[in-house]
Image (cartoon, rainbow, N blue to C red):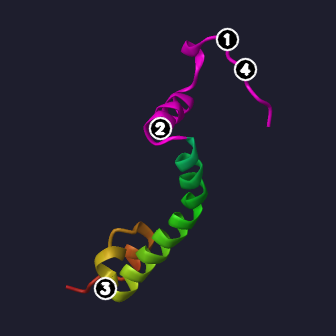
Amino acid sequence: MRAVKFTSEAQLPVADENFKMLQKLIGPRYLTIAKTWVPTMAVWGTVGGVALVHLTDWRLFLDYVPYINGKFKKDD
């Protein structure tokens, strides 16, 4: 990946501006620590979501999934 050089502050993309704002707020050390935890938290969030669907009334959640919703139609 090539590094992109900007000639002025006005040309910075929005993501870089948000990154600079976060760096000022929490500091560069804690920002790098938080970036290393993002994949772990994504995995645990997914596991928690699957566990929630498994342990509760799964139809309550899966009725909103388009493909699965059609498989389990109630005969009224």
Crowding near the residue tagged with mark 3, few <14, some 14–19, many ≥20 C-alpha atoms within 10 Å:
few
Crowding near the residue tagged with mark 2, few <14, some 14–19, many ≥20 C-alpha atoms within 10 Å:
some
x then y, percent, for residue 16: 56, 30
> Looking at the image, which is closer to me, 75 or 20?
20
Left/right placement of residue 9 relative to residue 59 reads right
Image: 75 above or below 29: below
Q: Amino acid at mark 1?
A: Thr
Q: Are marks 1 and 3 in contact (CB under 8 Å)?
A: no
Mark 2 and mark 1: Cα distance apart in space: 22 Å
Q: Quadrant of residue 37?
A: bottom right
> Looking at the image, which is closer to me, 24 or 63?
24
Image: 47 above or below 20: below
Queried whether the magenta region covers residue 7, the answer comes back as: yes
> Looking at the image, which is closer to me, 27 or 38?
27
x then y, percent, for residue 40: 56, 66
* Magenta range: 1-27
Identity of the residue drawn at 37% across and 80% down: 53
Crowding near the residue tagged with mark 1, few <14, some 14–19, many ≥20 C-alpha atoms within 10 Å:
few
Circle 4 or circle 2, nearest the eye:
2
Image: 31 above or below 59: above
Name the residue carrying label 4: 5
Name the residue carrying label 3: 56
Identity of the residue drawn at 35% across and 88% down: 55
Closer to the chain start, of discs 1 and 3, is 1
